[in-house]
Image (cartoon, grey):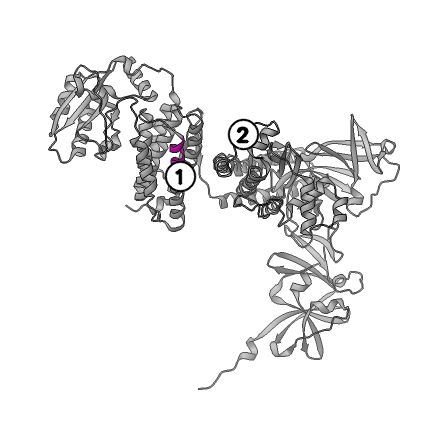
Amino acid sequence: MDVSQYLEIFIDETKEHLQNLNTQILELEQDPENENTINEIFRAAHSLKGMAGTMGYKRMQTLTHDMENVFSEVRSGNIKVNGDMIDILFQCLDALDEYLNNIQTNADEGTNDNENLIKALNDQMNKKGTEGAKPAATEPEKTETAPAAGENGVRDKWREIKFDDTQKNVMGQAASQGMNLYGITVYVQESCLLKAARAFLVFKAIEELGEIIVSNPSAQDVEDERFELDFSLVVVSKESIDKVIAAIKNVSEIEDAVGDVIPAEMYQAKTEARETTAVAEVATKTEQKPEAAKAKDKKTQAPSKPVVNRTVRVDIEKLDVLMNLVSELIIAKNSLVSVSGTESVKSSAFNEQIEYLESVTTNLHESVMKVRMVPIESVVNKFPRMIRDLSKKLDKKMELYMTGEETELDRTVVDEIGDPLMHLLRNSADHGLESAEVRKQRGKSEVGSIFLNAYQDGNNVVIEVGDDGNGIDVEAVKNKAIERGVVTAEQAENMSEKDIIDLLFHAGFSTAKVVSDVSGRGVGLDVVKSKIESLSGEVEVKTKLGEGSTFIIRLPLTLAIIQALMVVVGGEKYAISLGSIQTIEDIPVSDIKHVQTKEVIYLRGSVIPLIRLDQMLDNKSVKGPDENLMVVIVKKGEKLAGLVVDDLIGQLEIVIKSLGKYINKCKFISGATILGDGEVALILDTNAML
Amino acid sequence: MEELTVKDKFDTTQYIVIQMGNEKYGINIAYIDNIVRMQRITRVPKAADYYRGVINLRGEVIPVMDLRIKMGLEEVPETKNTRMIIIKLDNGKIGVIVDEVREVVNLSDSEVEGVTYRNNGDKKATFISGVGKVGADLISLLDINSLVAE
């Protein structure tokens, strides 16, 4: 069967499963008894195995099969989760990642057999302690089969099956619907050669009379002939037990079948309604059929969330084309609006239609923008694992706290923001957090905290990355800068604390005494800054020595089309993004006060500095010196400023066009736009002015 | 076995000849996207003095340079012959304002002489990559890349 056409789907879905496994195993580390997590992991491993098998990747299949086995044991309570197992599991995930990367580049999984991992997994399985005696015959190296207490004596192996909550639930439901629940153990003749075939016939026979809910070993293992001479089932049927047993015995080479009604205690221990896990079971079944996914539908399910996501994968180039077309539509709409304003076609019907057109295009634009918006979760969800690895590597205890993972950013931005964030986190872990002893001395908890908060602020998304560690030692930075000749000693004296901290963003700068492969080479922060600036964002640092540092990254939400206020300064038109504007005020000249030679106004309890745009833009205001000032109050985070303009034109939806690299030397101009009459207006970047 | 030598016809480059004052300059036609009449220019604050601003060319925002200022010539008022030549480079388009556009000429390699001006403070010297002879005229060929560079 030619599976190459499914390669893309396989890669995408495998990536998701691996990511899911990462998250789940981390959770498992914190909460080793959580049944939900264990089930999720088991299901994910099972799906991975199925997909790998279908695509013909034998090594992946083997590794995931062994992982699945370990988890099967954990699920039935035979072995407990411990730190070693978690480490091995993570290593397995890394190995699977490697396979996947090989597949992506060469369409082949590579030659790494990962024998050591497989051996480690098997060792874990052999650690089955004396907790609970199970007859599960999945491995040839099987050990104990403690005798069970049943009426038929040892033969009633079905009595030892431990059911998980889903299974108990299903059994409870069946029982309440008046169906019979039978536990049956089937024995195959010793001389039988094709045990799997016989088992299959048994399954078929039973399915004509009822349904098999539980199989021990699992149905897959029975299919693969991973059982000795017997397997046990739980059957739901309306027929009598004798009929079922007779049907089983009818299959050739079946030596015996023993069974009885399942006593209620076996499935009534926990009666927590878990409908969501039942839905998840359905999801698992559909996941086992990747070939059928012609429509490329995918179900993402986490047992704690009751909502099922239905998604469609779309090529990002198609989205870009769509965005461009919407931009052009908006420009055309603007031209139409301005023409309608000038021409004498002032009929109300025409204006009504124009307004309707305007609202429709605005909605269209918003919808297309939303399509391109992706929650940063997809980028940050690999960070907890990274912090855990760093914690072990650097031998410092640390915890990562994240909020706002659902905050959305444009897809292109999300792709680019991952690396800078990762670097800042590594910095915090490596340089920021002190060693355990120092922390104890300072009265801080032994476990360092690193946090990542994301939230929307006006027209921007703000991502804060910080720690409660040492903070930035401004003196050390200053001295290092002088030492490296980045600044002279006199220059350093005159620099404010902020300026000195900004030095950190210079290429080649690092105060680390030891270069590790985590950080310290001085390559990181300048790359972070330039990457963020290339996304039209900015980064700043807040730090307190001994208490910690926070890096604040600000990124624009929308990249191409914004709502703007058009203003006139010195006869020239400029656009100011509406998201930054707080209020517009009419200020008499007498209200202007001076603080340290800077002009300010006192407005509703706050002192707001004035910025005269005509001066900033090398122009001259046309207003007289005594006329009232038209002031646009803009904000950036907590800071406010008042921009003095000559006049206001009105609100306009504009398409941002880049000025290109040749002419844009002005920090305050972020781009240009084409107005309805064809004129070009420049767009002011208020963030750069504050 | 005769050798067909049609080299002369095919080794020529075409140049657009422009007039600035009483000197003629040539621009390699391969770089030229468009030639348009003067239109409204929007000033861009804090740009270099030889950049007059930006224009809207059928939906594109293109920066525009005044060649006279860049070459250190005195400014003259606009005439009906003044044109903007839109140059296309790897990383974008640039418009160049010239007094007049004259004609297209073909120059072969043999008709072009390279020049090495001593650096005598003559601004325009740095942008000339050679001099071509057409009839009785000398045409200074502009090096677009150095014209546009910082």
The answer to if A647 sits in the magenta stretch is no
Query: Left of A56 or right of it: where is A387?
Result: right
Q: Main secondary structure of the magenta part?
A: helix
Same chain for marks 1 and 2?
A: yes
| Secondary structure state at the residue bearing disc 1 | helix
| Secondary structure state at the residue bearing disc 2 | loop
| Residue wearing tag 1 | A91
Rendered image quadrant of residue A503: top right
Q: Is residue A452 visible?
A: no
Looking at marks 1 and 2 on the same chain, the residue that comes earlier in the sequence is marked by 1
Q: Residue at x 40, y 26 (%)?
A: A32
The amino acid at mark 2 is Val
The amino acid at mark 1 is Gln
Rendered image quadrant of residue A65: top left
Name the quarter where the C terminus of chain A is drawn.
Answer: top right
Rendered image quadrant of residue A191: top left
Q: Nearer the viewer, residue A200 or A128?
A: A128
Q: Residue at x 61, y 71 (%)?
A: B14
Numbered label attached to residue A446: none
Please provide percent x and percent y for residue A117: 34, 40
Q: Which residues are magenta?
A: A83-89
Q: Nearer the viewer, residue B34 or A622?
A: A622
Please provide percent x and percent y for residue A143: 23, 29
Query: Left of A127 or right of it: where is A517?
Result: right
Is residue A489 positioned above or below A299 on the image? below
| Residue wearing tag 2 | A447
Query: Left of A447 or right of it: where is A292?
Result: left
Q: Is residue A379 visible?
A: yes
